[in-house]
Amino acid sequence: MMNLLLGYSFYYPLTMSLLWIFGGIYYFLRLERNAPRPDQPPKLDYWPKATLVVPCHNEGDIIRETLQHAAQQDYPDFEIIAIDDGSSDDTGRILDELTGVYPQLRVLHFPENQGKAMGLRMAALAADSDYLICIDGDALLDRFATRWLMWHLATGPRVGAVTGNPRIRNRSTLLGRLQVGEFSSIIGLIKRAQRIYGRIFTVSGVIAGFRITALHQVGYWNTDMLTDDIDISWRLQMDFWDVRYEPNALCWLLMPETLVGLWKQRLRWAQGGVEVSRRYMKLLWVWPRRRMWFVLLEHILSVVWSYGILVVLVLAILGVFFRLPVSLTVPGPFPGWYGVILSAVCIVQFLVSMMIERRYEKTVGREFFWIIWYPLAFWMIGMLTTVVSVPLTLSKKIGARAVWESPDRGIQ
């Protein structure tokens, strides 16, 4: 039994790393290698109007910079809708002030905190276009990001959503630098691999484009889900809309640089994954939705892995103080030779992803020294948040409104 548990605990991440490596390489060779650079977006004879949506809750310190980059988009026809969702700081006043600076800006004010999903719903109903480009309140859009996202939506009639390529702005601490590598070697590579087998687990909430027709067909964003981005991604794909990844659509965001802030963020992400699996699992077991099976299976296996690692760690600690039965004895911190192989494959994954990501950020290789510590630090956080998220999600009252909490924006 112990050999089975140890084998799964280490072979699962090994298998997934290899899948992401080969899927990412295939995606790069097929779709990226000869593609234009981010500053050379494709051309169309006609670009439809787009609506840039910026939900805000207590973003007074950073919203000016966000809207400045949004207003500077190299796109022929767009409007901006900012939502002040019950902010207790000066966000609302600043947004009203900026309407005099940017004529394409409109502001929606909510007197009380309604949650990001409700803000996005209202913006979709108020939009004067058929397409939304949704960004977070701290996202700095690359000048050409809207063109790249809109190219997919304008040329693909079955494209319901397109997710962009978030990059980390704050890199002054170890946690910040680790997340630079994470978004490149883990998240970016995963999205490439998932596009190869046909379905994406989630769009990036910080930058994503949507077709309003598709949103209307699935009922827009659910207001009772902690992670609106995961939920809408699953429902669009369950309704047979295509969800794509566009690495040339760049944006820069702030991430937590404290352990408390990182824990809260990752716990919310973990709860979101469990929520969608719980809600939609029964609806997936029909043949037309078979391409979602692997996405669900991948998530279930990751949850099982987290609990398996927890059991191994607890037994290892108990084994230091007590004599355990042989069947429950953990032989060491790594189960022999394949622990070394796992570490080597992780390093290869980091190298492959950084070689790919150099197209978008020349200096990303500088973070390689720091990213090698990622498995030790972030796997542990990911494991613990997953373990905690399952009972929290199962005990959550279905239908309860998910509202904003001001996130940790890091050390600025």
Image (cartoon, grey):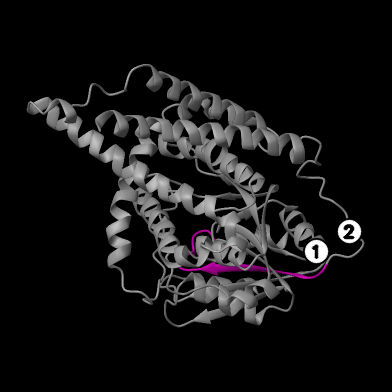
- Residues 205 and 175: in front is 205
For the record, the magenta segment spans 48-63
- Residues 137 and 133: in front is 133
Q: Check disc 2 and report the residue beneath it.
A: 44
Mark 1–mark 2 distance (CA, rounded to whole Å): 9 Å
Residue 69 visible in the snapshot: yes
Give the side of residue 78 with respect to residue 66, left or right. Answer: right
Kindly identify the residue that appears in the image at 51 percent across and 62 percent down: 285
Q: Judge whether 355 appears above or below 266 on screen.
A: above
Measuring from the top left, give residue 352's x and y in whole percent.
61, 28
Determine the secondary structure under disc 1: helix
Tag 1–tag 2 contact (CB < 8 Å): yes
Q: Judge whether 289 appears above or below 38 on screen.
A: below
**From the image, which quarter does the N terminus lie in?**
top left
Measuring from the top left, give residue 260's x and y in whole percent.
31, 49
Residue 100 visible in the snapshot: no
Kindly identify the residue that appears in the image at 65 percent across and 51 percent down: 198
Q: Check disc 1 and report the residue beneath it.
A: 154
Determine which quarter of the picture holds residue 146.
bottom right
